[in-house]
Image (tube, rainbow, N blue to C red):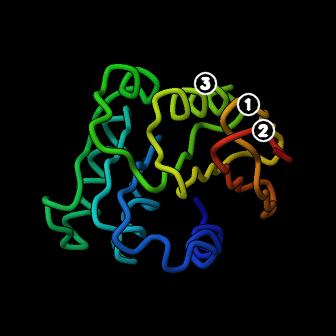
Amino acid sequence: MLDRVREAVFSSLGEQVVDARVLDLFSGSGSLGLEALSRGADFVTFVEKDSRALKTLADNARTLKVSRERYRIVRGDVLRSLKKASNEEQVDWAFMDPPYEKGLIEPTLKMLVDGNWVRSGGGIIVDHSKRDVIPEGEGWSLEDRRVYGDVAVAWIGLGGEEGA
């Protein structure tokens, strides 16, 4: 996620990230989850399958001197990881930065909602190509969408269809 886009996302979240539990899916270098930790999040779970990205993520966490008690890194495919993981504790925010235009947004949203991963009052934020469409689904609605050049960010609310 571009720095200016990440800044806009966290400015919009404000204090909602303080003491939050966060899920950073398709985490790459970990910029979203690490930013959440720097802004007071309690704990972040990163999920990423690319070994080079995982190395960068671990290096970034060390460079920033983030305590290992404040995060967990899961190596694996996001959809498979969510399917096999036991959701013992819901998160407040789920960040998604899937590869653009690969059809991963809808199945990931469905898995998050069906698995009850995000607690009431929280939400899902999706970084995506402006060409990607955020589908409507049972259990979630598109609350806001902002475009920054070729990139867009969608804020997904939980609990029903748009306008419900």
> Which of 104 and 112 lies nearest the eye of the viewer?
112
- Name the kind of residue labelled 3 in the image: Pro
- Name the kind of residue labelled 1 in the image: Gly
| Quadrant occupied by the C terminus | top right
- Say which residue appears at 28% left-offset and 66% top-offset: 42
Q: Are marks 1 and 2 in contact (CB under 8 Å)?
A: yes
Image x and y of residue 71, in percent: 23, 55
* Quarter holding residue 106: top right
Q: Is residue 40 above or below residue 88?
A: below
Q: Which residue is mark 1?
A: 137
Mark 1 Cα-neighbour bin, 10 Å: few <14, some 14–19, many ≥20: some
* Residue 63 numbered mark, or none: none
> Which of 47 and 21 lies nearest the eye of the viewer?
21
- First in sequence, mark 1 or 3: give its number: 3
- Say which residue appears at 53% left-offset and 27% top-offset: 114
Q: Which residue is mark 2?
A: 161
